[in-house]
C-alpha cells in the first residue's frame, strides 16, 4: 500500500485524486548495533533509500504528481541535485505525463541522471548551480501549464510528512531525537509538520554542510535553501536545531554507517549521523537518523572515498597473499 492509500485521511486528497503509487513508504527502521553502543544511545536508521526510486523524495512526489494530474497539469517540472529529478521522472512516467528536469551541469551523480533518462524525462543540464536551475523552473512553471514539483510545492511536504507518522508507528513511541540532512530544508519542515500533527514533541536535529555550495555531498549542494525562513521559524520556536558539519565529518559518518552496520546510504544521507557528535544526547535516549538516499545513487563517491580493489591472479597463493595484506 502506497502513501496516498495508507494515509488518505491525513493528506489533502479527494475521491478524484488519482490512486498513483509505486509502492513508496513503509521503509525499514533498522536498529543500529555498534553505533548505538559507541554513542550510548538507542540509535535507529530510517532507511529511506528503500523507496522505489531510492530516496525519500518519493513520498512527497507521489502526492504532488497525483495532485498535478487532478488539477489538469500538462506535465511536471523540477530543478534537482538528482534525487528529486529521478523521483519526478518516475512518477510522471507512471502517471502518463511528461517531465522536464533541470540540474546543474556536470554536478550530479551519474546514477540519478540515468534514472531520469531511463523513464523518459527530458533532462536539461543548466550552466549554473542548483539555485539557478530552481529559479528557471519557477519561471517556467509560472508561464506554462507544467506544475512545479520541487518542495516549494506544498503537496510535497504533505506526502513527505508521512515519514514522521511511520517512525512513530514502527518504534511504537516517539523518539527523543530525530536527525536528518538539511539541503533545501523541505524534509526538515515536513518532519516537523508530521510530528506536530501526530501530537508528538521531540528534538529535530537538521544537519547542513559547512561549505554548502561545494560540499562533496552533491545531493545537498544548495547555497540558498528554499525553506530557510520556515526552518529559522522552527528554530525560533525551539522545534529544530540546525547543526553544521564538515565534509570530513560527513564522510567519516558515511563510512561508519556502512562498515559498522552494513547499511549503505549516499554520503549526504550521513549528515544527520555526523551531527550527533555536536549535540548532547541523554544516555539511553532513542535517536532516529534519517538516511535519505541509497548508496547506489552515488557510486562515484565510493571511488573517491574507499580503497581501490586489487587485481590478482586466480591462484590460491596470490589470493592468500592479498588477504594476508588486508
Ligand atoms: N538527502 C538527499 C539524498 C537529498 O537528495 C536531499 C535533497 C537532501 C538530503 C536534502 O533534503 O532539501 O529536503 O533538505 N535533494 C534535492 C534534490 C535537492 O534535488 O534531489 P532537503
Image (spheres, rainbow, N blue to C red):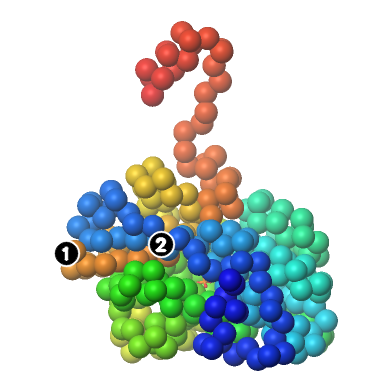
Q: Quadrant of residue 175?
A: bottom left
The structure residue drawn at horizontal position 63% and vertical position 88%, both measured from the top left corner, is: 13
| Residue lying at the far left of the rendered structure | 283
Locate the C terminus and report the quarter of the image it occupies: top left
Q: Which residue is mark 2?
A: 29
Residue 283, numbered circle: 1
Q: Quadrant of residue 173?
A: bottom left
Disc on the earlier residue, 1 or 2: 2
Q: Residues within 10 Å of mark 2 (few under 14, many from 20)?
A: some
In the image, is 108 to the left or to the right of 317? Answer: right
What separation in Å lies between label 1 and label 2 (alpha carbons)? 21 Å
The structure residue drawn at horizontal position 19% and vertical position 57%, both measured from the top left corner, is: 40
In the image, is 103 to the left or to the right of 292? Answer: right
Q: Residues within 10 Å of mark 1 (few under 14, many from 20)?
A: few
Give the percent coordinates (x, y) of residue 285: 22, 67
Q: Does any atom of ligand 1 lie closer than 8 Å to the CB of label 2? A: no
Q: Secondary structure at mark 2?
A: strand
Q: Nearer the viewer, residue 16 or 188?
A: 16
Give the percent coordinates (x, y) of residue 296: 57, 49
Q: Are marks 1 and 2 in contact (CB under 8 Å)?
A: no
Amino acid at each position: 500500500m502506497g502513501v496516498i492509500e495508507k494515509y488518505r485521511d491525513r493528506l489533502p486528497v479527494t475521491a478524484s485524486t488519482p490512486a498513483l503509487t509505486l509502492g513508496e513508504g513503509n521503509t525499514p527502521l533498522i536498529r543500529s548495533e555498534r553505533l548505538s553502543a559507541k554513542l550510548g544511545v538507542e540509535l535507529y536508521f530510517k532507511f529511506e533509500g528503500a523507496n522505489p526510486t531510492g530516496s525519500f523524495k518519493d513520498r512527497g512526489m507521489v502526492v504532488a504528481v497525483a495532485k498535478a494530474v487532478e488539477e489538469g497539469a500538462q506535465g511536471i517540472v523540477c530543478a534537482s541535485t538528482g534525487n528529486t529529478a529521478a523521483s519526478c521522472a518516475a512518477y510522471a512516467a507512471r502517471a502518463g505525463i511528461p517531465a522536464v528536469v533541470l540540474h546543474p551541469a556536470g554536478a550530479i551523480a551519474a546514477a540519478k541522471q540515468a534514472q531520469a533518462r531511463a523513464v523518459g524525462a527530458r533532462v536539461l543540464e543548466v550552466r549554473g548551480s542548483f539555485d539557478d536551475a530552481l529559479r528557471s523552473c519557477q519561471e517556467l512553471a509560472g508561464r506554462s501549464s507544467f506544475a512545479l514539483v520541487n518542495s516549494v510545492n506544498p503537496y510535497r511536504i504533505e506526502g513527505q510528512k508521512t515519514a514522521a507518522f511511520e517512525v512513530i508507528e514502527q518504534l511504537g513511541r516517539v523518539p527523543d531525537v530525530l536527525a536528518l540532512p538539511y539541503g533545501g530544508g523541505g524534509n526538515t519542515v515536513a518532519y516537523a509538520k508530521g510530528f506536530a500533527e501526530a501530537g508528538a514533541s521531540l528534538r529535530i536535529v537538521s544537519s547542513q554542510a559547512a561549505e554548502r555550495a561545494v560540499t562533496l555531498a552533491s545531493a545537498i549542494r544548495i547555497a540558498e535553501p528554499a525553506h530557510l525562513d520556515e526552518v529559522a521559524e522552527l528554530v525560533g520556536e525551539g522545534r529544530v536545531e540546525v547543526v553544521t558539519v564538515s565534509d570530513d565529518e560527513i564522510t567519516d559518518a558515511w563510512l561508519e554507517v556502512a562498515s559498522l552496520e552494513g547499511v549503505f546510504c549516499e554520503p549526504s544521507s550521513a549528515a544527520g549521523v555526523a551531527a550527533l557528535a555536536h549535540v548532547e544526547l541523554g544516555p539511553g535516549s532513542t535517536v532516529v537518523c534519517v538516511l535519505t538516499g541509497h548508496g547506489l545513487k552515488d557510486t562515484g563517491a565510493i571511488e573517491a572515498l574507499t580503497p581501490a580493489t586489487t587485481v590478482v591472479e586466480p591462484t590460491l597463493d596470490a589470493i592468500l597473499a592479498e588477504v594476508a595484506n588486508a
